[in-house]
Image (spheres, helix red, strand yellow):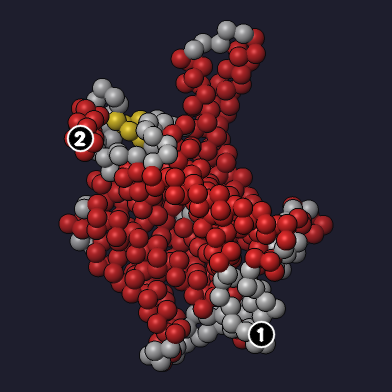
Amino acid sequence: MSSHHEHPMPVRGEFFTNGTKVIFFLMLVGLSVTLYRFIAGLGAVTNLNNGYGWGIWIAIDVACGVALAAGGFMTALIAEIFHKEKYHVLTRPALLTAMLGYTFVAIGVMTDLGRWYNIWHPMIPSMWQGNSALFEVGICVMSYVTVLYIEFLPIVVEHFKAKFKASPPVTSFTRLISTVLNIADKTLGKVIKLFIIAGVVLSCMHQSSLGTLMVLAPTKMHPLWYTNVLPLLFLLSAFAVGFPMVIFESLIASRSFKLQPETKILGKLARYTPVLLMVYLAVKVIDMTLRNAWGYVFEFSMESWFWLAEVIIGCVVPIVLLSFAKYRYKPLTLFLSASAVILGVALNRINVFLIAYTPLYYEGTYFPSFTEIMVTVGFICTLVILYRVIVMYLPVISQPDTDSPDAIVNQLKNTQVTQ
């Protein structure tokens, strides 16, 4: 699809498709269980115990959520800071995904806290603990969520400015709103670059600090994953998964909304992924060698199989596939490669926070309860529904002008598919 005639605009189409109805139902179930958790407490809905103080809500909702939201700062980095203008069509959807992702990371943390009503404490300077890695993560995530919403404001302002332009203000109140929107538009245009830079810096800080959390537990982690360079590995893996997450989201959205996929621009973006993955894998291999940890890989224990799955699925397979141009520009192989990277990084976070972790005092194994799983499923489904609502109301996804040749071709293809 040529970007020459493209502009961000609300997506048109039916909101409640068959798939959306299923996702909406799962969202309602998950949110109902979440509400019950806040009323009845952790013990009523989780299988956590004194040995396992956290489970999938931290490993998946928080650790995986933070990593998979890296597409926002990676796209901002390449398009806005490195001035790769051709990737601008991807920045708004990536920003929205990151904004929603981090919002639910914060909600996931609150859900996991025993005293969830005290989540506001890190905002009070008298309660700060500068020596805590978790405090640094909390402050950075709160700051970055704020930055993301500020970065998203120009999209909201643009939408309402267009509405006022279509129907000019006729009362003093609407004229006041129009003036406020114009001032906001000019002000945001002048300062938004600062927030983009701040967002990239904050992301790098807390992506690595999540790894620091587990460096503090050398006696509780399996040697396959415990290393002093865990913060660096977390940061490098976040770099590597950023673009695949953008590709995954773009292809899913194109399919869902019956749009022509941005295969050409996504294929160009995918060129960076093998390089980033190879850097991450090289550091991992060097670290394993220096620690003499390769023996654990060939024990063929449960931990070694999980480690091999993480490396082969998340690194080796996508490096091979994305190193060839013929695979980068095919939607199916591009989608599978991006999915493999995402699955590999998700496995890494689950491995570090769950599989590698063994409490000092055994009080039974941990496996998430059905209600725990439903809370996580509910959060994911809510994110999907909110994404759908926003892109159908605000100018987020770039689409061809209705009178451009690209749009005419798209309409003919969609008509043929419908028939």
Judge by depth and name the residue closer to the eye, 405 or 252. Answer: 252
Alpha carbon separation for disc pair 1 and 2: 60 Å
**Mark 1 Cα within 10 Å, few/some/many (few <14, many 20+)?**
few
Inspect the image, locate mark 2, and give the three-letter code of the amino acid beneath it. Gln
Asked which secondary structure carries label 2, the reply is loop
Comparing labels 1 and 2, the label whose residue is closer to the camera: 2
Q: Residue at x 29, y 30 (%)?
A: 400
- Which corner quadrant holds the N terminus? top left
> Which element type, helix, strand or loop, lies under badge 1?
loop
* Residue matched to label 1: 363
Circle 2 residues within 10 Å: few <14, some 14–19, many ≥20: few
Is 254 on the left or on the right of 216, as rendered? left
Q: Nearer the viewer, residue 254 or 344?
A: 254
Q: Which quadrant is the C terminus positioned in?
A: top left
State left or right for residue 8 relative to residue 209: left
Indicate whether 191 appears above or below 252: above
Give the total of numbered labels: 2
- Of all residues, the one furthest to the top in this rendering is 170
- Which residue: 58% across, 70% down? 369
Q: Earlier in the sequence, mark 1 or mark 2?
A: 1
Q: Quadrant of residue 242?
A: bottom left
* Residue that sits furthest to the right in the current view: 126
Q: Position of residue 17 (x, y in %)?
A: 39, 41
Residue at mark 2: 419
Q: Is residue 291 above or below residue 234?
A: below
Residue 206 in view in this figure: yes
User: What's the residue type where badge 1 is placed?
Assistant: Glu
Q: Answer with left or right where residue 157 lies relative to residue 336.
A: right
